[in-house]
Image: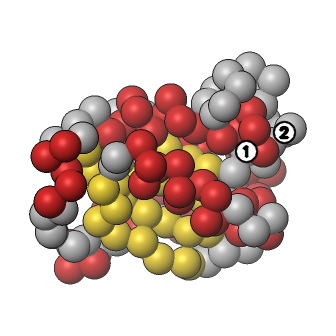
């Protein structure tokens, strides 16, 4: 069982796509174990995107991710990290496969609607940047044994 951090970015909130995006992960069979709407602080943004510091897109990225509320979530399931990234699609909307979130709803490389962790180490760090341990809900869904 693996955990991943997913975050609908400010463009997804502004465009009213929370429900549409969350639905895809629910229907896939992943399990939501934490969620909240929040405004990302400059400190949280810098921690979240530390690996990109110094790149040419870093400053616009920080501006973007702090420009409005985001919907932060923790999901779990077997291979949740890779499965989530396959539903999200490649960073650039032009390279994202049809049927993925970014291909279906985004035209931009930066304004690409949703973040997903890329490794177990990133997931743990990112979850800790946005959630306290007591905000993560442990529960078992009966349906999970069928998925
Ligand atoms: P994410 O971290 O948001 O899930 O996206 P990712 O793994 O697909 O992409 P990553 O390389 O980690 O980049 C993080 C975010 O930075 C913005 N970006 N802009 N060339 C550009 O203008 C550029 N490249 C990346 C995107 O918002 C990307 O999701
Ligand atoms: Mg990334």
Q: Is residue 99 above or below residue 142?
A: above
Ligand 1 within 8 Å, label 1 CB: yes
Instruction: Name the residue beneath numbered marker 2.
Output: 108
The structure residue drawn at horizontal position 77% and vertical position 60%, both measured from the top left corner, is 11
Report the residue marked by disc 1. Answer: 112
Pick the residue in front: 116 or 84: 84
Closer to us: 147 or 127: 147
Residue ID at (81%, 65%): 15
Q: Is residue 47 visible?
A: yes
> Which color mode does the image show?
secondary structure
Quadrant of the image where one finds ligand 1: top right
Horizontal arrangement in the rendering, residue 26 relative to residue 75 (left or right): right
| Total numbered labels placed on residues in the image | 2
Quadrant of the rendered structure where residue 84 is? top left
Q: Position of residue 95 (x, y in %)?
A: 74, 20
Q: Secondary structure at mark 2?
A: loop
The N terminus, quarter of image: top left
The answer to whether mark 2 and mark 1 are in CB contact below 8 A is: yes
For label 1, the SS is: loop
Dot 1 surroundings within 10 Å: few (below 14), some, or many (20 or more)? many
């Amino acid at each position: 069982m693996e955990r991943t951090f997913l975050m609908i970015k400010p463009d997804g909130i502004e465009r009213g796509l929370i429900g549409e995006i969350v639905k895809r992960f629910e229907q896939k069979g992943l399990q939501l174990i934490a969620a909240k709407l929040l405004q990302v602080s400059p400190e949280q943004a810098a921690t979240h995107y530390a690996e990109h510091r110094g790149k040419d897109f870093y400053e616009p990225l920080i501006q973007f991710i702090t420009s409005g509320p985001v919907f932060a979530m923790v999901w779990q399931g077997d291979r949740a990290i890779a499965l989530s990234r396959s539903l999200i699609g490649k960073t650039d909307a032009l390279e994202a496969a049809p049927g993925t979130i970014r291909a279906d709803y985004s035209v931009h490389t930066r304004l690409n609607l949703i973040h997903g962790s890329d490794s177990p180490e990133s997931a743990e760090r990112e979850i800790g940047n946005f959630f306290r341990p007591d905000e993560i809900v442990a529960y078992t869904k009966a349906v999970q044994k069928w998925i």
